[in-house]
Amino acid sequence: MSEIRLSKNRLYLDNAATSFPKPPEVLQAMIHYAEHIGASAGRGGYAEARASAEVLRICRQRLCTLFNGENPDHFIFTLNCSDALNMVIHGWLKPGDHAICTAMDHNSILRPLNDLVRWRMITQTRIPADPATGWVDPQDIRKAIRPRTRLIAMAHAGNVAGTVQRIAQIGSIARRAEVAFLVDAAQTAGHLPIDVQAQSIDFLACPGHKGLLGPLGTGCLYIRPGLEKHLRTSRQGGTGSVSERDTQPDFMPDRWEPGSHNAIGLAGLSEGIAWILQRGVANIAAHERALGTTFLEGLAGVDELRFFGPRNMADRVGVWSVRIEGRGPLALADQLEKEFGILTRAGLHCAPLAHRTMGTDQPSDMAVPTDVGTTRLSFGPFNTLPESQFAAAALAAIASRKTSPVSALHVR
Ligand SMILES: Cc1ncc(COP(=O)(O)O)c(C=O)c1O
């Protein structure tokens, strides 16, 4: 997994925001599209327009294979993960409904639900999580289900503590109660195996630009066959199909994809998924677990550093939130970049309730009360074990307030 090198002296550890680098095949496919295809899918009968439609068809097929869907046409292309989550939250819930989400969720779930609550459309219950592990107890979700509950929406893994939730168990609770189950796979798609059928997932929202290794501006939504009949569309427009009608087509996937596609982005996404299928998502997961184990080993005994989320690699993804008391998360991120060339993200990571749960919404450096949250290091498939060791050594050096004994150049 180490065939790609990062830019010299820079170690990108912000894969939870978007993955970087991308496999060379992704970039080659986008260049090929730009140079030789160019046309808009479904907008012409000539060879280039047909080639564009074929790019989309193959991408859908690969998504369906990766997530074990029933039908490739039930994978809808979206702008990103937030777009996919919004399509379900706003399209599925009706006035008077009740929805369930969790304290570990991202604003991409919290904000659309809150918007509906604010307009008195729905009521909601937010299930708390364990402050140490970030786990949500599936039984708490079961107990929160009411007669008017129509949606359980939650992140598969959190983007702050990296906790993997027990979604198969929650999926079967939801299925038994006939409540739709929307899974936000922003931090797991491409990182962990996901099987929409085995895990009783009704809607799966994924970014294309994170673990699926496509470019920014891509994402997807899986809609379980049959549910599309009950999901309202908030966007209508040209689809290149049934143009004699002035109403939106009712068939998949056109009903959900008005307007021209980001075909060049999808050409890249398709190759990102192919890369994952070729390596095997279980092998990628094993590699990322090894990165985590190495990272933890490198930090053993560094008592000044606090970690959040589970320690057991089987229960988490490679998203690590850390904090050094007395040093603000932003100041720590700054130091990691300036001294070591390590790129991380500091702050609340669009997940305010997760930080409230862990108590990290408060400043760690009282002199800078606005510097709240954690410093987040997030690994991807191209990171290597020496890079993981290097990140741990850098944190250890900063935590012990020594000037760096390691140089950003030593591991590469
Ligand atoms: C858990 C989670 N959900 C949703 C999102 C939103 O993803 P996107 O930026 O693709 O809309 C993110 C982004 O970081 C995330 O981490």
Image (cartoon, grey):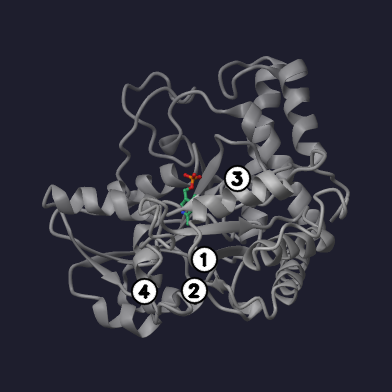
x, y percentage for residue 57? 64, 38
At x 80% / y 60%, what residue is drawn? 405
| Disc 2 residue type (three-letter) | Gln
The N terminus, quarter of image: bottom right
Marks 1 and 4 sit apart, C-alpha to C-alpha, by 18 Å
Marks 3 and 1 sit apart, C-alpha to C-alpha, by 15 Å
* Residue at which label 3 appears: 18
Left or right: 313 in relation to 247: right
Are the residues flagged by discs 2 and 3 in contact, CB closer than 8 Å? no
Q: Name which quarter of the figure residue 29 lies in.
A: top right
Q: Earlier in the sequence, mark 3 or mark 1?
A: 3
Judge: label 2 CB < 8 Å from ligand 1: no
Mark 3 crowd level (few <14, some 14–19, many ≥20, 10 Å Cα): many
At x 66% / y 56%, what residue is drawn? 190
Q: Look at the numbered disc 4 and give the secondary structure of its residue.
A: helix
Q: Earlier in the sequence, mark 2 or mark 4?
A: 2
Q: Earlier in the sequence, mark 4 or mark 3?
A: 3
Left or right: 211 in relation to 1: left
**Pair 2/4: label in front:** 2
Mark 2 crowd level (few <14, some 14–19, many ≥20, 10 Å Cα): many
Q: Look at the numbered disc 2 and give the secondary structure of its residue.
A: loop
Marks 1 and 2 sit apart, C-alpha to C-alpha, by 6 Å
Are the residues flagged by discs 1 and 2 in contact, CB closer than 8 Å? yes
Residue 159 appears anywhere in the view:
no
Judge: label 1 CB < 8 Å from ligand 1: yes
Marks 2 and 4 sit apart, C-alpha to C-alpha, by 14 Å
* Residue at which label 4 appears: 174
| Disc 3 residue type (three-letter) | Thr
At x 13% / y 59%, what residue is drawn? 96
**Pair 2/3: label in front:** 3
In this orientation, which residue lies closer to the viewer: 220 or 338?
Answer: 338
